[in-house]
Amino acid sequence: MAAPPAASPATAISPCARLPSAPLGATPAAVSFPSRPAARPAALAARAGPSRRLDVVPAAAAGHQKLMGSLTSNEGLRFGVVVARFNEVVTNLLLQGALETFERYSVKAENITVVSVPGSFEVPITAQKLGKSGKFDAILCIGAVIRGDTTHYDAVANSAASGVLNAGLSAGIPCIFGVLTCEDMDQALNRAGGKAGNKGAEAALTAIEMASLFRHHLG
């Protein structure tokens, strides 16, 4: 039986056949792409979960209120100041800075009560007692704890810090921590009017602002 005639080179089909060239001068046909990607198949979308939208949660609610104490709206505000006598050379300077700040911001002297206690360990219980009396809008706690050769420093410093915090929480009014905890006397003096400022003055500013916040916004 005769074999079938072989395909001629002109009619053979090649998997790499080239498309006929466009005539010279002809404008190539425009190729358009969809303006948005095709939707994902339902099964794939279900596995991927919901897409994240950036506008779901606004950065801040429209019309929100911002409450803040004032350093000038202090008419009638009353302050208690508890100051430790231990390391008196430092605490006297801190107290002086606090009283000068109260005067600078027009807090009347008759609205300030200063209570002296032996040391920083006795400051928190006194602050709590003053706070619960209902006579004050804020209590300023002043002391100086300086590290020595024993662990006594750690016990007093930690007790003073946590004690002042608990005094404020218990009394329901601001109790401001103005107790220095320093490595040596030079550090303490630098923070009691030296090159690092006066931490007593800074604590008094905090007391004024917090008292104003509680009196005018949170009372």
Image (cartoon, rainbow, N blue to C red):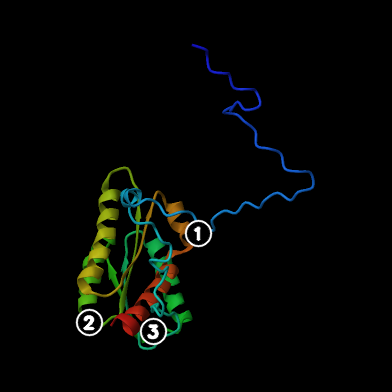
- Identify the residue shown where x is 35% and y is 48%: 44
Q: Between residues 140 and 35, which one lies in front from this camera angle?
A: 35
Disc 3 residue crowd, few under 14, some 14–19, many 20+, Cα 10 Å: few
Q: Quadrant of residue 52?
A: bottom left
Quarter of the image that includes the C terminus: bottom left
User: Residue lying farthest top?
Assistant: 1
Q: Which label is found at residue 184?
A: none
Q: Amino acid at mark 1?
A: Ala
Query: Looking at the image, do the residues carrying marks 3 and 1 touch, with CB atoms under 8 Å apart?
Result: no
Tell me the mark number nearer the camera, choosing from 2 and 1. Answer: 2
Q: CA distance from mark 3 to mark 2?
A: 18 Å
Name the residue beneath numbered marker 2. Answer: 134
Name the residue beneath numbered marker 3. Answer: 109
User: Residue lying farthest right?
Assistant: 25
Disc 1 residue crowd, few under 14, some 14–19, many 20+, Cα 10 Å: few
The location of residue 210, given as percent across then percent down, is 36, 75
Name the residue beneath numbered marker 1. Answer: 196
| 121 relative position to 103: left or right | left
User: Residue lying farthest bottom?
Assistant: 75
Q: Secondary structure at mark 2?
A: loop
Q: Amino acid at mark 2?
A: Gly
